[in-house]
Amino acid sequence: MNVNPLGNTVLVVDDAPDSLSLINDTLEQAGISTLVALDGKQALTIANRLKPDMVLLDAMMPNMDGFETCQALKADPALSSIPVIFMTGLADTNSIVKGLAAGGVDYLTKPVNPDELLARMRVHLKNARLTSSAHQALDSIGQNIATVDKNGQIVWATPQTHALLARANVSQNWVATVLAERLKEWFPHEPPAGQTLALESPEFPLEVTLLEYRNNREVLLKFSNATRVPGEKKLQQALNLTSRESEVLYWLACGKANKEISQILDISVRTVNKHLEQVFPKLGVENRTAAAGIAIRILN
């Protein structure tokens, strides 16, 4: 049962030698490269240096327990996307909830069943690869996009987003406190896709647009310089479109389906289709992909 077709490396963090030996043997037999840490601090050092594809983390360890270790991993943008599976002898609900709240994607009760461990790993490694591919795709189109959790903390962001925040002269502390607090106050109002939030920064005002709710824990946002011409206006001016046509094309370039565009703009799907039927000839293209490509080049 080999779950390692792409050469995954897994960091196992456990202070119990017997448990560590069993898991290490299981992973080696499955062809998985294994890194070992005996405590939380050592795990963070190894993770920073070698960037494993997954972390198997014992919940109960002296000094720095698994919950604290997981929180530290998730607080580091370079490590936050690594899936963490908790291993715990504690099967009570509070411990399970605590592990998931700390950022874990799953948990296993000790003693760990080898077949169950490999099955869970296979699922989460696949999900991590899909997430990574989606992030790379967003990176490649140059959008100022970020994923944040419900507490307003950035989980992942494109390089363009980090560059925009740097130009705005905001510190990591500002992002973790001021930005997070504003978002945390905004989210309970359940703003619809397309709604924006204005922010003040040292250099220029920022604007955050809610793109979509990814799941129960994360929200996809777009950041922009509020003093610059909005994307819809850029498209309208560059392509000689109507205001509504430019809005439809803008959201098309953001990867939205017609149904999603209709919800964002509060118009029918039929109306979205009619606008696109007018947009395609104006751009000299025949399909959505070509239209989106032109819009993305202009927006960038």
Image: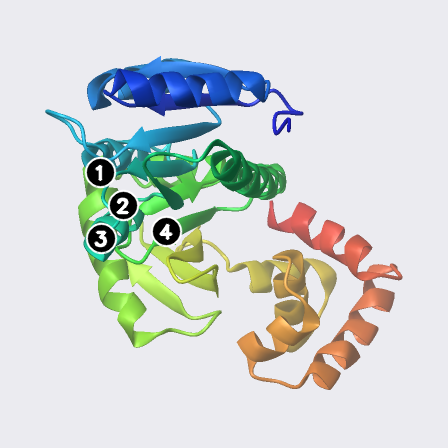
Amino acid type for the residue under numbered disc 2:
Gly
Residue under the point 81% across and 54% down: 290
Answer whether labels 1 and 3 touch (C-beta < 8 Å). no
Of callouts 4 and 1, the N-terminal one: 1
Place of residue 38 in the rendered image (x, y in percent of width and height, measured from the top left): 25, 16
**Mark before the other along the chain sequence, 3 or 2:** 3
Task: From the image, tell me which residue sits under label 4.
Answer: 148
What colour scheme has been applied to the protein in the rendered image?
rainbow
Position of 206 relative to 83 (above/below): below
Q: What residue is pinned by disc 2?
A: 99
Establish if 53 lies above or below 231.
Answer: above
State the CA–CA distance, disc 3 to disc 2: 11 Å
The 10 Å Cα crowd at callout 1, few under 14, some 14 to 19, many 20 or more, is: many
Q: Is residue 228 left or right of residue 60?
A: right
- Do residues under tags 2 and 4 come within 8 Å of each other at their CB atoms? no
The one nearer the camera, 88 or 134, is 88
Does residue 42 lie above or below 216 as drawn? above
Q: Secondary structure beneath disc 1?
A: helix
Marks 1 and 3 sit apart, C-alpha to C-alpha, by 15 Å
Whether label 2 touches label 1, CB < 8 Å: yes
Whether residue 241 is visible to the viewer of this picture, yes or no, is yes
User: Of discs 1 and 3, which sits in the foreground?
Assistant: 3
Tag 1 residue: 67
CB contact under 8 Å: marks 4 and 1: no
Q: Earlier in the sequence, mark 2 or mark 1?
A: 1
Q: Which residue is mark 3?
A: 92
Which of marks 3 and 1 precedes in the sequence?
1
Please state which amino acid type lies under the numbered disc 4. Val
The Cα atoms of the two marked residues, 2 and 4, are separated by 19 Å
